[in-house]
Amino acid sequence: MLASLRQCETLIEAMFRIQRSITRRTPIAEVLQTVTEAAAELLGDEVLVVAIDEAGGTAGTVGSWSLGSRQLLTEAGREGPIHQGVGAMAAPVFQDGQAIAALVAESRDPHRRYSQTEQDIFLALAEHASLAMNAAGAVETMRRSVDEALHSARHDSLTGLPNRTLVLELLTEALLRRDRGRRIGVLLVDLDRFKMVNDTLGHSIGDEVLIRMGERLRAAVRPQDTIGRLAGDEFVVICENAEVPELLRVAERVAEEVAVPLPLYGRDAVITASVGLAHSCGGTRAEDLLRDADVAMYRAKERGRSRIELFDRSFRQRLLQRLETELSLRRALTRDGFVLHYQPILATGSGRLLGFEALVRWEDPERGLVPPSDFIPLAEETGLIIPIGRWVLREACRQLGRWRAAGLAPDNLRMSVNLSARQFAGAGIVAAVAEAMEEAALGPGSLSLEITESVLMDEVLAMPETLAALKDLGVSLSIDDFGTGYSSLSYLRRFPVDALKVDRSFVRGLGIDVEDSAIVTAIVTLAHALGLSVVAEGVETPAQLEELRRLGCEAVQGYLLGRPEPAHRVERVLATIRSGGLHWPALAADPVSPTASAAIAAQALPSS
Ligand code: C2E
Ligand code: CA
Ligand code: CA
């Protein structure tokens, strides 16, 4: 057995090192050096490799050489595995079954005898040396094909540039040999909207663009910089020994070069790039540096593309936070983590309760009640809006169904639900609406869907049949935040819209700001001319309400009339309406205090 655990570890480590240098095709002399060093360490003696020539003489050595072991050599070459002399031993190294060298250990103590374990170790090392010789021989004959295989495993076949594997290797090496105090910079270059090129012009043109972009990068960077292609339309530049200003200059040249118009089938296409830049003065792993550049690139995309961003530690923090929020949102979906609040919508003239708008909130154990503005955008980006929106739709319908069943809501009371772009554009929206209505036994006229104006333009225009199908279900459609997007008369005429919801920002200045009054007047006039009704959002003061009434706006919604409240509080108000005795528009002293709002909603309701 080996003398100690330490020795055992040393042996395993040595074997591993040797095997690794063999597979890496390290020059044979270096492999032998590793073998002799390992043997020397384990035995505590001088060790060398002696090459044997065809006649059995010595043809050269690796390591230092002394006379004591010379006698052993010929025997080692000719015969059995181990030859032990006084103060020395030798083991043969074979190539193609032929002893071509000997591993020789020599002690300073002329009487040293080697134990069986020491001989075993020594033999194992000599066998590894043989392995290296044969591997080297084999690799030599196969070099061409191996080279090719290695090349294609580490290069991108389209552009011939190093691929991710090789980029990481090269970056690791660069980080190791970096000059003292100088930086290694990594630029991550991602073409903007490249998917569109592929989708509209086809993949062969897309490939051509990528090849051209690879060439442009080459022209834009410094001769000593390395270029690679990581994936799809993602390129990387490794800049060795550069300072930040220089790195930024390279990044700018890259961005400019990429954006030079590219003639594609007789037309000039301009393709821009988003560039992320990260740098290190050492102590960073290649993977980390690449990831930092990626984070910066992502940030450049987020900030509107076609720009350069330098990595900043806070980006990573923000990404992590986003990821965390996304995970919590996913959890909330499976654990009843959302709740709906309902805000009353009233008829301006009579004060009659027309319905409620369902507004989603996220009940997070850590964050508390999170408003939609804090999670809807992320939910839209991640696609989580689809399941969340589906839940909102079902729950809002179910709630109205429950109120009706309990005799709390008259048959003409309507529930309004917000629909986001992704939801509308996604498949199955019509089926989802039909299902939610059926489940809650809601007939035509019970449900209204609010679609934000910008959404309507971008997504809805492309799907008139979806709108028509929703109309067939007896669903009414409102344009939300009206006045903040494109206000085009033609689309109002073309689409089966029932109502416009005047954005809060215009209601705010009513009675104070002439311009706001003029805009609301115009919206009301326009809506009426087209046979649409108008709902004003964000009504907070009696003056605003008065002005809206004067302008002929049909319906109002706002803190003055009632805040969004959970179902159980709304129920209390609904119960008092049934028993009557409420006068419109009797307003509370502090219309925006949340505790007063249920009472305000109650007071705002009609008397009969
Ligand atoms: P929105 O559709 O314009 O909803 C009206 C927002 O104005 C609500 O904010 C409401 O609480 C607030 N509000 C109502 N009256 C007043 C008032 O008098 N003064 C002021 N300052 N604000 C008032 P909330 O609930 O935070 O919702 C914000 C937005 O989130 C909504 O704007 C809507 O776009 C979106 N949202 C809410 N629920 C959903 C949902 O279920 N699905 C989707 N896709 N979006 C939703
Ligand atoms: Ca809305
Ligand atoms: Ca709105």
Image (cartoon, rainbow, N blue to C red):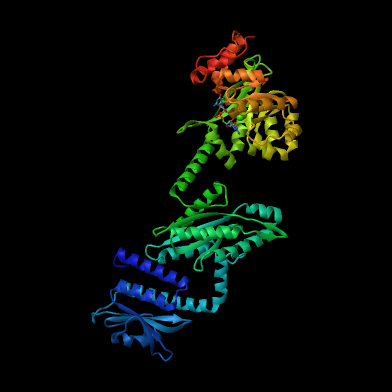
Q: Is residue 342 above or below residue 187?
A: above
Question: Which residue is nearer to you in this view: 410 or 204?
Answer: 204
**Residue 567 sits in quarter:** top right
Left or right: residue 300 versus residue 397 is: left
Q: Position of residue 46 (x, y in %)?
A: 30, 78
Q: Is residue 13 above or below residue 422?
A: below
Q: Position of residue 1 (x, y in %)?
A: 32, 67
- Viewer can see residue 182: yes
Left or right: residue 131 versus residue 256 is: left
Q: Residue at x 49, y 62 (%)?
A: 238
Question: Which residue is nearer to you in this view: 79 or 596?
Answer: 596
Point out the image quarter for the C terminus: top right
Q: Position of residue 528 (x, y in %)?
A: 73, 24
Left or right: residue 472 versus residue 224 is: right
Q: Residue at x 38, y 80 (%)?
A: 81
Q: Ligand 3 sits in which quadrant?
A: top right
- Viewer can see residue 395: no
Q: Is residue 360 above or below residue 550?
A: below
Total marks in image: 0
Q: Residue at x 56, y 69 (%)?
A: 151
